[in-house]
Amino acid sequence: MLSSHYYNDYAIEAGCDEAGRGCLAGSVFAAAVIFPADYHNADLNDSKQLSARRRYALREVIERDATAWAVGIVTPEEIDHINILNASILAMHRALDKLAVRPQAVIVDGNRFKPYGTLPYTTIVKGDGKYLSIAAASILAKTFRDDYMDELDQKYPQYDWKSNKGYPTRKHREAISRYGTTPYHRMSFNLLGGTGELNLDFKE
């Protein structure tokens, strides 16, 4: 069972996570989730540990049970302008902006964040496998982004985005080499570089 809270002094705690940071194409998505202080759910876990069917089933549970939830988006153009790390943090800030309930504290998956107003925050490595609200945020960010990439795949089926969701698979990179880029590709990335691992060659 994941922990329900990190902060003992704040009843309204928002968990944040992002999806799509390592992709060659598409927006980066982030989510923020607030659960009731005494919330428990043994089924919630890091989205990467769940099947797609399970993620979508849990998304309905999260949307029903959360005190508040929201999704923030940063576009490929914005990513190219401010770099992917800043874009990921901005997406989380945008999700927090959209919450119907103002949190008193924020917990974030990973080890990088920027202050959100004056709220206390803590970054937690592998937090999506430790805290319910971060796990829920990872599920929302992942499923909403997957829906978005499935829609883009209908416009550009040659890039196989329905399967790879914009990540640098061989088929995706071969399609870039053959067909060129789309308006949804992140032009600040080395789109064809290396061995299939993303080369994070940012423009500052």
Image: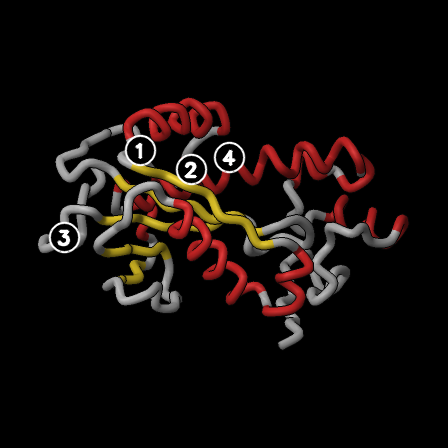
Query: Based on the displayed image, in which of its 4 quarters is residue 115 positioned?
Result: bottom left
- The local crowd at label 4, few if under 14, some if 14 to 19, many if 20 or more residues have their Cα within 10 Å, is some
Q: CA distance from mark 3 to mark 1?
A: 22 Å
Of all residues, the one furthest to the left in this rendering is 9
Residue type at the position of mark 1: Leu
Q: CA distance from mark 4 to mark 1?
A: 14 Å
Mark closer to the observer (3, 1) = 3
Q: Position of residue 72 (x, y in %)?
A: 49, 48
Residue that appears at 47% across and 42% down: 141
Q: On the image, numbered disc 3 is attached to which residue? A: 10
Residue that appears at 41% across and 37% down: 49
Q: CA distance from mark 1 to mark 2?
A: 9 Å
For the C terminus, the image quarter is bottom right
- Which circle's residue, 3 or 1, is located before the other in the chain? 3
Whether the residues at callouts 2 and 4 have beta carbons within 8 Å, the answer is yes
Residue type at the position of mark 2: Ile
Residue that appears at 32% across and 46% down: 134
- The local crowd at label 1, few if under 14, some if 14 to 19, many if 20 or more residues have their Cα within 10 Å, is many
Residue type at the position of mark 3: Tyr
Which sits in the foreground, 24 or 39? 39
Which sits in the foreground, 7 or 95? 95
Q: On the image, numbered disc 2 is attached to which residue? A: 139
Residue that appears at 21% across and 54% down: 104
Q: On the image, numbered disc 4 is attached to which residue? A: 143
Q: Position of residue 34 (x, y in %)?
A: 28, 41
Mark closer to the observer (4, 1) = 4
Q: CA distance from mark 2 to mark 3?
A: 24 Å
Q: Position of residue 131 (x, y in %)?
A: 25, 45
